[in-house]
Amino acid sequence: MAAKESKKENSGRRTPGPTNPMVTPILTDQYQFTMAYAYWKAGKHQERAVFDLYFRKNPFGGEYTVFAGLEECEGFLDYLRGIDCSDVEVYAIPEGSVVFPKVPLLRVEGPIAVVQLLETPFVNLINFASLVSTNAARHRFVAGKSKTLLEFGLRRAQGPDGGLGASKYSYIGGFDATSNVAAGMLFGIPLRGTHSHAFVISYMSLDEIKDKSLRKKDGSSTCEDFGSDSLRGYSAETNKSELAAFTSYALAFPDNFLALVDTYDVMRSGMPNFCAVALALSDLGYKAIGIRLDSGDLAYLSCEIRKLFCSIEKEFGLPGFGKMSITASNDLNEETLDALNKQGHQIDAYGIGTYLVTCYAQAALGVVFKLVEINNKPRIKLSEAVSKVTIPCKKRIYRLYGKESYALVDILTGENEPPPKVGERILCRHPFRESKRAYVVPQKIEELLRCYCAGSSDKKEEILPPLKDIRERCIQQLEEMRPDHMRRLNPTPYKVSVSAKLYDFIHSLWLNEAPVGELR
Ligand SMILES: Nc1ncnc2c1ncn2[C@@H]1O[C@H](COP(=O)(O)OP(=O)(O)OP(=O)(O)O)[C@@H](O)[C@H]1O
Ligand SMILES: O=P(O)(O)OC[C@H]1O[C@H](OP(=O)(O)OP(=O)(O)O)[C@H](O)[C@@H]1O
Ligand SMILES: O=C(O)c1cccnc1
Ligand SMILES: [Mg+2]
């Protein structure tokens, strides 16, 4: 079966299909096929079913999640159209949105045998994507808006696909760039990087550099022996193989000189060597970018380095030298970023790998895909654990905003209920706890589920935005969250509610479906 390109005449961007060649119709659990067979055998396979895809608990001890993976799902559906998914409708919250437990991120409607087959791939595609995006958003939250966040995780990711997905979804969650070249090429994510310790230790002496000539930035003349007369005493006691490595790197990238300074000794060797080469570049009209630190006390060292940069700016009258960039890496995570902030530091950029891409703090987001209606009849799944009872019916979702333009509550209503209105009081009920309810007078309302696949209906399909716009939406949505929902320690849960009508319906269906016990 060859992958089909999406048609999408009435929407904007074409979906190229899944970016991962492993995403094929057999990327599923066997029981999806056995159920499809049994539906068919019973003559039930064409019955129109509605499934909701959602999760039950926010990850990482937080109170929010970033929704991601929608584009990949649409791609998969386009691919499946070849085996007739033409009657499947997909409604989804826009990718990059901040989302909460129990709210359907995706509502999929169509012949039950076909929609059943979509469960495993859709849950697979949304789970990791949303988890990594949320992880990235959380790292961004601690790092602060002004810092540059670089995703360096490819080598430590769960296989090639884990790495590629992590790069894409870290970008959506607010990272600025990746070191993953494939992700840069495939998704247009900015590529960034420095160099490794191997580059530094591979040099033994300056004599190894055959051609030391460097043209001035303005092209007016060429310096034939770059570095030799410009060291200004900075590298008197330093490691000369490191100086050779830096000199060589500067000759290769005079406009992009960023050196890893912790190979031998940061303050006794790496920094003096870096400054010597940066000054030599400056003499020829080039501005060095800065340094990377990959070990030691990152807070302390960054402050010492900033002091050194500033003193050189003053001593040599070099505007901008003091503001050169300090990048830190080495097993960074939310906790270390937080600790660095508390201590005070001078770091401008973080390179984060392992903890980000492997989602070290939590392995999975418990996404589920549950049947909520068949043949226009709402269905419910009961459970001893109230949190596992499903919310029946084909539903609409609205996000209600309050006076201070923060999101107040999400409300689920039946598909045909009148929508909430701005300025009109509406009762929002906890789906399962009778006493928990509140009136809300929304100042702004956003309907969350939009049509991404119209199936055979004539609904207008949403345009899938470029990755950059999804990232922008994510950043914007996170800013609209009340700060107490966002804090890392004991955040306030965001309220997810149902309308009074839906509440009554859920509970009547519950009573209807639950057998009455008998005590003997
Ligand atoms: N000021 C700081 N406050 C809190 N944590 C820090 C600080 N500076 C560095 N860290 C973290 O402490 C850990 C230090 O790890 P480790 O002991 O493996 O590194 P190292 O000894 O500095 O480097 P290496 O072993 O690579 O030479 C890392 O996770 C790093 O991110
Ligand atoms: O620490 P992470 O968050 O995973 O970020 C990526 C790491 O990968 C690189 O070195 P690598 O770890 O390969 O070598 P090292 O163990 O000697 O630092 C880089 O210098 C970082 O330390
Ligand atoms: O470019 C870098 O500095 C880099 C890339 C991947 C992993 N560690 C560092
Ligand atoms: Mg490391």
Image: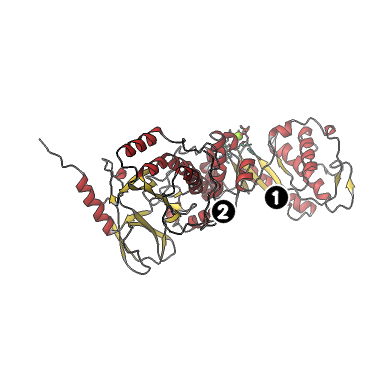
Q: Which residue is mark 1?
A: 324
* Mark 1 or 2: the one toward you: 2
Q: Which residue: 79% across, 30% down?
A: 204
Query: Is 461 on the left-hand or right-hand side of 31?
Result: right
**Quadrant assignment for the C terminus:** top left
Task: Kindly identify the amino acid type of the residue bearing the numbered disc 2.
Answer: Pro
**Residue 484 screen position, x and y as percent:** 42, 54
Q: Secondary structure at mark 2?
A: loop
Q: Quadrant of residue 2?
A: top right
Q: Secondary structure beneath disc 1?
A: loop
Q: Which mark is residue 312?
A: none
267 or 64: nearer the viewer = 64
- Would you call the spot at circle 1 few (<14 residues within 10 Å), some (14-19), or many (20 or more)? some
Indicate which disc, 1 or 2, sits on the residue closer to the N terminus: 1
72 over 480 or under it: above or below:
above
- Picture residue at 81% right of the left edge, 31% below the top: 205
Residue furthest to the left in view is: 520
Q: Position of residue 157 (x, y in %)?
A: 55, 35
Say left or right for 110 vs 144: left
Q: Residue furthest bottom?
A: 423
Relative image position of residue 226 (x, y in whole percent) = 85, 42
Q: Is residue 80 left or right of residue 377?
A: right
Task: Please determine whether, in this image, residue 178 is positioned above or below residue 449.
Answer: above
Q: Estimate the x, y position of residue 5 in percent, counting from the top left.
A: 55, 47
Label 2 Cα crowd, 10 Å radius (few <14 / some 14-19 / many 20+): few
> CA–CA distance between discs 1 and 2?
32 Å
Q: Residue at x 71, y 52 (%)?
A: 322
Q: Amino acid at mark 1?
A: Met
Tell me, yes or no, if residue 443 can be seen here.
yes
In the rendered structure, find residue 466 and report the number of the disc placed on it. 2
